[in-house]
Image: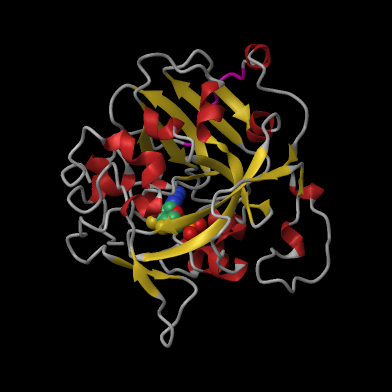
Amino acid sequence: MQIKIAKTSECHESTVTPKSIYLNRRQFMQAGIVGSAALSLPVNSIAATGENTNPLSPPASLKPSFGSISKTAFGSTETPAPFDTATTYNNFYEFGYGKGDPEKKAASLKPYPWKINIEGEADITGAFDLEDLIKESQLEERIYRLRCVEAWSMVVPWIGIPLGSFLKKFRPNSKAKYVYFETLYDPTQMPAQNGNALDWPYREGLRIDEAMNSLTLLSVGMYGSILPNQNGAPVRLVVPWKYGFKSIKSIVTIRFVEQMPQTTWNMIAPNEYGFYANVNPGVDHPRWSQKKERRLPGGLLFPNVIDTQMFNGYQEEVASLYADMDITRFY
Ligand code: MTE
């Protein structure tokens, strides 16, 4: 991705750390959000499982005590990238701009415990413990293709819950036309936030029907385990039909809003990174083609270049969302 020094004048959204919003726990429990434990996130629940010899398996240090994870048909015919590929080739600008930086530097992120602020146009808002928010939900494994706007891709077995069922618990009202997401802003945990290459915090957004689409996943894990820090611990989005930059990591704020929110890459270069950012081989990036992608793992001798599919191959599930739109204009 192109790095440009962001002007401070471009910073329209809040750049503060999570706000101390009163936790209305009783209201939340009345809504039936807090319940029996299906997932235990704390790091102290990690169980030692011995040496890691399976390329699809995370190391022992990442084995959590997840409750049951239901397998789904999503991606059952795909071959996931090895765990090492998915966790050493990353984009997480809060830790640097090299693909290996997040893996080397993300140990400073402290993902447990973690609060999420739910704000805006909904009946139930406040600051909630992530664990409380998801322990009632049935976790699912979904194997999705992730297509980066930089024209590389990989297949990842995510664990999470459908974002739509998560959001509905807060009872968004009729003014909630979009959902806005913000990553943690804390330069002590995310050292590259001391620089101004991006206008921190990283922010993203979806139209409400995109957020409610059954493909959109709120992910808390991958490869059968919790998310490694470099992949967006403890909670991130996965929106498989959109370029990877929409899949925001380490989320601390979710806000229901009426207007289309400003988003990080769109603010930096609107002609290069649209709000919608649907994978589309028919609309090239101004500086490179989007017709093909490098499926990882690969290398110089085996670049593994494949054709990019419309909506990253998820047309059946999402094409109807854009039936009335000129998607070459609203890219
Ligand atoms: N989220 C935050 N907060 N910061 C980032 O730099 N990079 C995005 C997305 N989410 C990014 C982010 C981009 S460009 C991509 S391609 C994906 O994360 C990469 O996810 P991965 O590193 O788990 O493959």
Image position of 330 (left or right of 30): left
Part of the protein shown in magenta: 17-23
For residue 147, say whether it is visible: yes
Residue 200 rendering spot, x and y as whole percentages: 38, 46
Determine the residue positioned at 20% across, 47% down: 270
Residue at the bottom extreme, as displayed: 301
Image position of 107 (left or right of 272): right
Q: Is residue 138 above or below residue 52?
A: above
Assess whether residue 22 is covered by the magenta stretch.
yes
Image position of 9 (left or right of 131): left
Determine the residue positioned at 69% across, 53% down: 225
Q: Tell me where residue 133 sits by quadrant.
A: top right
Q: Is residue 308 above or below residue 193?
A: below
Figure label count: 0
Determine the residue positioned at 36% across, 48% down: 242
Residue 202 rendering spot, x and y as whole percentages: 40, 45
Residue 271 rendering spot, x and y as whole percentages: 17, 50
Q: Tell me where residue 52 sits by quadrant.
A: bottom right
Relative depth, front residue between 14 and 306: 306
What secondary structure predominates along the stretch shown in magenta? loop
Q: Quadrant of ligand 1?
A: bottom left
Check the picture and name the quadrant holding the N terminus: bottom left
